[in-house]
Amino acid sequence: WERIGDLVILPGSSLRSELWKSLGSPLWKIIAECLGVTKVARQGPVASTGTRDSGVEMLLGEDGWVEHRENAILYCFDATKCMFSSGNVTERSRMGELNCDNDVIVDLFAGIGYFVLPFLVRARAKHVYACEWNPHALYALRRNLRASAVEKRCTVIEGDNRLTAPREVADRVCLGLLPSSEGSWAVAVRALKSGGGILHVHENIKDVEEEDWIEYLTKSLQTLANAQGS
Ligand SMILES: C[S@@+](CC[C@H](N)C(=O)[O-])C[C@H]1O[C@@H](n2cnc3c(N)ncnc32)[C@H](O)[C@@H]1O
């Protein structure tokens, strides 16, 4: 199980047998009490659609709203609507440890601020353009920016990043979409300043395919940059 704020999320397959079901809601109350939370939910698959909706199902608690603190950053969101990958803690932490003092950053898949907040709060980025199209994530993102008092250094851009992303402004572009962000590689190259910059490209790949993928990525980016005359 994982704990996010005041919510414990059980694995998707847990406590599903008829015997457990027959115990009804007292079971969830006991679990909540033992683990020191007020809300209990069960994990479900993240939607494979572009909005990456959460599959979390509430078992105890009125709603899925959580306030989760990680590495001194507060993430607030509705866990039944927006996904939160506890396993990505290392990458969220790594982004916060970068030195982005004078950097303008474009995050093409901002979500609730998974990387936007570490960039602004801990890495001290000069400005972040945060692209996002899921209304639930946009609501949480704006709240989270205000809660960390960094909203003045962030421009939230609503809509499909392939149509809305800014051009030639960025020192870094973040492409945090799984299983692949390839659909927005061209947009990312266009978003970089004409002198170049850094791309953070996320992708699900098997260990044994890593070298081939890096070669494919490098060639693709080179082709895109050539096509754009950079
Ligand atoms: C949930 S985060 C990704 C978190 C984590 N890296 C992962 O994928 O497991 C990805 C966000 O990108 C947004 N998104 C996906 N495609 C988009 C697009 N073309 N334009 C704007 N936002 C997009 C989704 O709505 C979602 O909130």
Image (cartoon, helix red, strand yellow):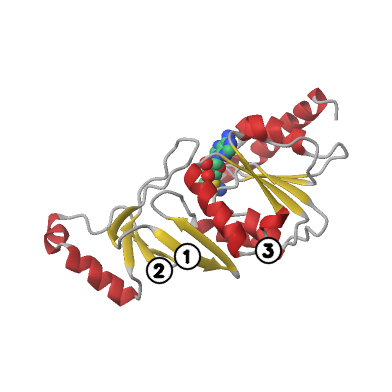
User: Do the CB atoms of the residues marked 1 and 3 lie less than 8 Å apart?
Assistant: no
Label number found at residue 6: 2
Q: Mark 1 Cα within 10 Å, few/some/many (few <14, many 20+)?
A: some
Q: Earlier in the sequence, mark 3 or mark 2?
A: 2
Q: Quick one: which residue is furthest to the top in this view?
A: 227
Which residue type carries mark 3? Answer: Val
Q: Is mark 1 within 8 Å of ligand 1?
A: no
Q: Earlier in the sequence, mark 1 or mark 3?
A: 1
Q: Earlier in the sequence, mark 2 or mark 1?
A: 2
Asked if one can make out residue 178 in the rendered structure from this viewpoint, the answer is no
User: Can you tell which quarter of the image residue 20 is in?
Assistant: bottom left
x, y percent for residue 114:
58, 54
Q: Residue sitting at 28 percent across and 53 percent down?
A: 13
x, y percent for residue 190:
76, 33
Q: Residue sitting at 55 percent across and 67 percent down?
A: 70
- Closest to the observer: 36 or 133? 133
Residue 153 to residue 34: above or below: above
Count of marks, rendered view: 3
- Quickly name the residue at label 1: 67
Q: Residue sitting at 80 percent across and 46 percent down?
A: 171
